[in-house]
Image (tube, coloured by chain):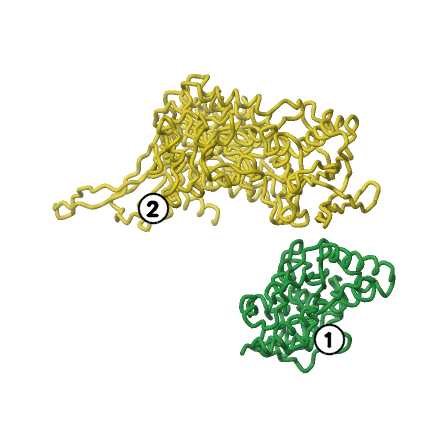
Chain colours: A green, B yellow
């Protein structure tokens, strides 16, 4: 059984418990042990692009270092956490000045200058387990279900740092949907922003964005939308005014593996 | 005792502004063997050369060092001057104190020091120079043109017109290239086929032109005036000499679902096919990937209906070997693959097409007989959006950094033709800049805007998405109005960047010619030698050298022909005497040099040697053919025993230069 350091992130302890719970139970069923480091903190929620700002990146470095110390790859599941951690890893392994500032501040036993392999849970399914192997473990397939994958903006970009999939024509969630027996729906807005944090400032803007996403998915015949991001889920559910159901991808995964009662019909 | 003259050039201010030329002349005057050291404003000028010549005569010089620009610029000039004053031209050395010194340094003190060091190295080298004499080598009076598009056809016609034999090698079953696929040409809107096909016929009927269609260059050996080329004639499974091009086989062939390359896969052809009605040669070709007879052994319909018995399912590739004096590369271009441009939904929606596909959709011989219909549902499009610069002028690695040059004009042409033929269609063009330099080009574009009311919008398209009702949502920005736009389009046309043909790179390796980072062939000089490659005897024609429209391609095709004719007119050419030679006493017969020689100039011979004890022994030693050797020096580096040496660049000369620099 392969062991990963697992970083849940703070939203998964409060609003997004479903994302977390089913990620854990499914991983176990798929033969992966997720080990949560004792001292993880909030990722900061958004990656600060300011070059001279290190404070918001420290917690990401701590968890990256903790994975390195345990000799395990790191797996994340929330899009926002993944984005922050992956960008931190990308920058600290390339930007010497940032690395030295961070290490001067943290005073780790051994300086951290990158090297931890970071997976998003979806990448773990694709690259470690393999969608073909996942397909074999499905007991409760979503046959005939038309499912729309919603990537949002954080999962795919910036493409050099995230390096998960083609940002304009991603396939990873569609391939996941096929693996659990469903039919993926391709629609225009699947990799556009849901409005994100702007819902706090300007609700109308978030409503406009998230309803554009949901209308586009519905227009192409989707019966449900899945996402990996708690904030996307919030916007799509609360701000879009759409009646299309939205789930975390881990919920469908757990259902397909027979670990959760279904929304199949 | 050597008597060396040093001549330091100011090159106006090019050198003199950064290098203290007088100090350089002064310092080099004290070098051993130097009897005269002078500076002059323009050494390459008539009077500058006179200065050198007089010094050679008066001072009885045995060697000359010119401190000036790159030897690529004026080495020949000074060698000629020396020869006319009675000095062997290979006793002249150039110290490059311009490109490698004055142009790259800012501080006079540093630049002057470096110029002195470079001059000292040249003086040290010239001490060891020996007189070299050039040999003559005959010129084969036949040219090879690689690529049978408009560039290659024009070049071949011009060379044939001058009275020389020319072979065209074309990898497709027909000559004609991209121009044959184009509907109309800008800025005159005359039909491309109407002006191209007569030239194709002319080429095929010209007694001096041989067309090897469906053939590829497999190997090139030799050198200017005497290339040996292997051409693979791919099996077309039809005897070219028998086939009359009647087309009965293509009608009767039961396998009709093969994507038609000529129409860019927009319709289908049969497994045995003639690419288009005016193909040259008009000969059928069997596609073995689809032919039922070739795949399963069951069918043979074409063979039964062919009245002249031209079908030969067992035909094999054949290799032709031919000598040529000159080679012209005319391998052309292709639009780039749009897989990396998913924001434009090219792979998701059949109604998003490239500009070349639009040419076929609008062409009378195209899939819809010339009526513009949407590929998806064959309906008439009412709103068409053109997107320019797809992959051109792109600052990331997925596109091309250069401007593809032809897109602005053909997009204006498409927009105008559509508005002319279907006035009920709204046409939008999104552009970064509209670039229309060229005779009557800007007038043409303005007609599209002013007379045909094409909506030109400055701004780029961000996203193209197919909708469930069959329309296409085009999201774009209008930079001048500072607005975000959504256009409900029926069709989207992408002006894809153009890139050199994929066969160009392996060909460049075979020809030992240079390419730039974008795989365009590099010309010998960007301004003054635009149709020659840096490799002697290899000329460049058309878009293989850089993006070009048809008038420019034809002009360059003729220019390349003129250069090739100039070479073929000579009975013999002077060879470079700076070639390798092997010291047979040191050679241990290891073959290292033979393996690295890109020209095949080195062979091994068994030679009898007399030993100190008066016995004889046969040893295997390297032998260089000086007529084939190009003096690249690869063998001298590879040789483990130091037996290989290069005339004019001997190991001892190089070491003397290094010593002079390090002293």
Q: Is residue A69 above or below residue B270?
A: below
For label 1, the SS is helix
Report the front residue among B85 and B78.
B78
Residue under label 1, please give it.
Answer: A12
Q: Quadrant of residue A258?
A: bottom right
Q: Position of residue B97 (x, y in %)?
A: 55, 38
Residue A32 is situated, as x and y percent measured from the top left of the image, at 58, 76
Mark 1 falls within which chain? Answer: A
Quadrant of the drawing holding the N terminus of chain B? top left
- Figure check: B193 above or below A253: above
Name the one closer to the observer, A195 or B108. A195
Q: Residue at x 63, y 70 (%)?
A: A121
Q: Residue at x 65, y 54 (%)?
A: A169
Image mark count: 2
Q: Is residue B63 left or right of residue B559?
A: left
Residue at left 57%, top 34%?
Answer: B546
Which of B524 and B162 lies nearest the eye of the viewer? B162
Residue B216 screen position, x and y as percent: 42, 36
Q: Which mark is residue B311?
A: none
Q: Which residue is mark 2?
A: B595
For mark 2, name the chain.
B
Question: Which is nearer the eye, A212 or B460?
Answer: A212
SS under mark 2 = helix
Residue A123 position within the rendered picture, expressed as x and y whole percent measured from the top left: 61, 66
């Amino acid at each position: 059984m392969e062991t990963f350091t697992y970083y849940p992130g703070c939203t998964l302890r409060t609003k997004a418990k479903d994302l977390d719970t089913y990620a854990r139970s499914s991983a176990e069923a798929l033969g992966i042990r997720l080990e949560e480091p004792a001292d993880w903190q909030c990722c900061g929620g958004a990656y600060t692009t300011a070059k001279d700002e290190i404070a918001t990146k420290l917690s990401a470095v701590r968890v990256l270092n903790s994975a390195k110390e345990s000799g395990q790859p790191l797996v994340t599941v929330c899009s926002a956490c993944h984005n922050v951690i992956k960008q931190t890893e990308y920058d600290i392994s390339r930007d010497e000045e940032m690395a030295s500032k961070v290490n001067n501040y943290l005073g780790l036993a051994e300086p951290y200058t990158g090297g931890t392999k970071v997976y998003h849970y979806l990448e773990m399914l694709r690259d470690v387990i393999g969608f073909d192997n996942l397909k074999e473990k499905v007991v409760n397939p979503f046959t005939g279900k038309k499912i729309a994958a919603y990537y949002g903006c954080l999962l795919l970009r910036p493409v050099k740092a995230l390096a998960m999939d083609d940002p304009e024509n991603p396939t990873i969630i569609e391939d996941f949907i096929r693996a659990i027996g469903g039919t993926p729906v391709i629609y225009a807005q699947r990799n556009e922003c849901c409005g994100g944090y702007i819902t706090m400032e300007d609700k109308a803007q978030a409503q406009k964005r998230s309803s554009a996403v949901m209308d586009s998915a519905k227009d192409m015949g989707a019966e449900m939308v899945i996402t990996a991001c708690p904030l996307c889920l919030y916007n799509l559910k609360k701000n879009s005014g759409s009646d299309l159901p939205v789930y975390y991808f881990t919920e469908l995964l757990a259902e397909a593996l027979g670990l959760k009662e279904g929304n199949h019909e | 005792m050597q008597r060396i003259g040093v001549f330091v050039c100011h090159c106006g201010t090019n050198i003199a502004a950064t290098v203290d030329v007088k100090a350089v002349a002064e310092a080099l005057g004290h070098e051993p063997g130097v009897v005269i050291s002078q500076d002059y404003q323009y050494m390459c000028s008539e009077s500058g050369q006179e200065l050198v010549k007089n010094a050679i005569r008066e001072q009885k010089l045995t060697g000359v060092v010119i401190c000036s620009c790159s030897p690529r610029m004026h080495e020949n000039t000074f060698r000629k001057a020396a020869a006319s004053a009675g000095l062997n031209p290979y006793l002249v050395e150039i110290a490059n104190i311009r490109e490698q010194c004055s142009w790259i340094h800012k501080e006079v003190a540093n630049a002057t020091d470096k110029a002195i060091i470079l001059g000292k190295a040249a003086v040290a080298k010239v001490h060891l120079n020996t007189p070299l004499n050039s040999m003559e080598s005959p010129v084969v009076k036949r040219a090879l043109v690689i690529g049978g598009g408009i560039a290659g056809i024009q070049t071949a016609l011009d060379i044939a017109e001058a009275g020389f034999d020319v072979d065209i090698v074309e990898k497709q079953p027909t000559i004609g290239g991209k121009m044959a696929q184009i509907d109309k040409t800008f800025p005159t809107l005359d039909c491309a086929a109407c002006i191209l096909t007569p030239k194709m016929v002319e080429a095929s009927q010209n007694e001096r032109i041989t067309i090897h269609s469906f053939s590829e260059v497999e190997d090139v050996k030799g050198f200017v005036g005497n290339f040996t080329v292997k051409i693979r004639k791919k099996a077309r499974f039809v005897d070219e000499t028998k086939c009359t091009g009647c087309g009965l086989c293509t009608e009767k062939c039961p396998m009709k679902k093969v994507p038609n390359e000529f129409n860019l896969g927009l319709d289908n052809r049969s497994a045995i096919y003639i690419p288009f009605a005016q193909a040259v040669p008009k000969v059928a070709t069997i596609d073995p990937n689809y032919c039922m007879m070739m795949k399963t052994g069951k069918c043979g319909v074409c063979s039964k209906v062919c009245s002249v018995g031209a079908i030969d399912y067992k035909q094999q590739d054949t290799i032709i070997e031919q000598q040529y004096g000159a080679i012209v590369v005319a391998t052309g271009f292709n639009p780039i693959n749009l897989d990396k441009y998913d924001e434009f939904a090219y792979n998701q929606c059949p109604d998003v097409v490239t500009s070349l596909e639009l040419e076929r959709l609008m062409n009378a011989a195209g899939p819809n007989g010339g009526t513009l219909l949407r590929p998806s549902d064959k309906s008439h499009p009412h709103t068409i959006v053109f997107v320019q610069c797809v992959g051109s002028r792109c600052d990331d690695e997925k596109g091309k950094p250069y401007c593809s040059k032809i897109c602005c004009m053909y997009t204006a042409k498409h927009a105008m033709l559509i508005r002319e033929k279907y006035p009920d269609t709204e046409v939008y063009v999104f552009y970064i800049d509209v670039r229309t330099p060229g005779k009557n080009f800007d007038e043409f574009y303005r007609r599209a805007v002013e007379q045909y009311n094409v909506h030109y919008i400055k701004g780029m398209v961000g996203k193209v998405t197919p909708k469930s009702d069959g329309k296409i949502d085009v999201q774009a920005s209008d930079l001048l109005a500072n607005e975000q736009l959504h256009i409900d389009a029926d069709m989207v046309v992408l002006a894809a960047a153009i890139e050199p043909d994929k066969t160009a790179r392996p060909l460049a390796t075979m020809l030992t010619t240079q390419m730039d980072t974008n795989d365009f062939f590099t010309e010998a000089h960007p301004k003054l030698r635009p149709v020659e490659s840096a490799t002697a005897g290899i000329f460049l024609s058309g878009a293989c050298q850089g993006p070009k429209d048809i008038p420019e391609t034809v002009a360059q095709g003729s220019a390349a022909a003129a250069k090739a004719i100039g070479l073929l007119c000579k009975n013999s050419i002077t060879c470079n005497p700076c070639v390798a030679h092997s010291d047979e006493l040191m050679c241990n017969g290891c073959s290292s040099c033979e393996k690295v020689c890109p020209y095949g100039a080195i062979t091994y011979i068994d030679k009898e040697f007399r030993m100190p004890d008066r016995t004889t022994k046969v040893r295997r030693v390297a032998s260089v053919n000086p007529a084939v050797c190009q003096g690249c020096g690869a063998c001298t580096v590879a040789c483990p025993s130091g037996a290989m040496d290069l005339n004019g660049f001997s190991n001892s000369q190089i070491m003397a230069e290094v010593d002079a620099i390090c002293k």
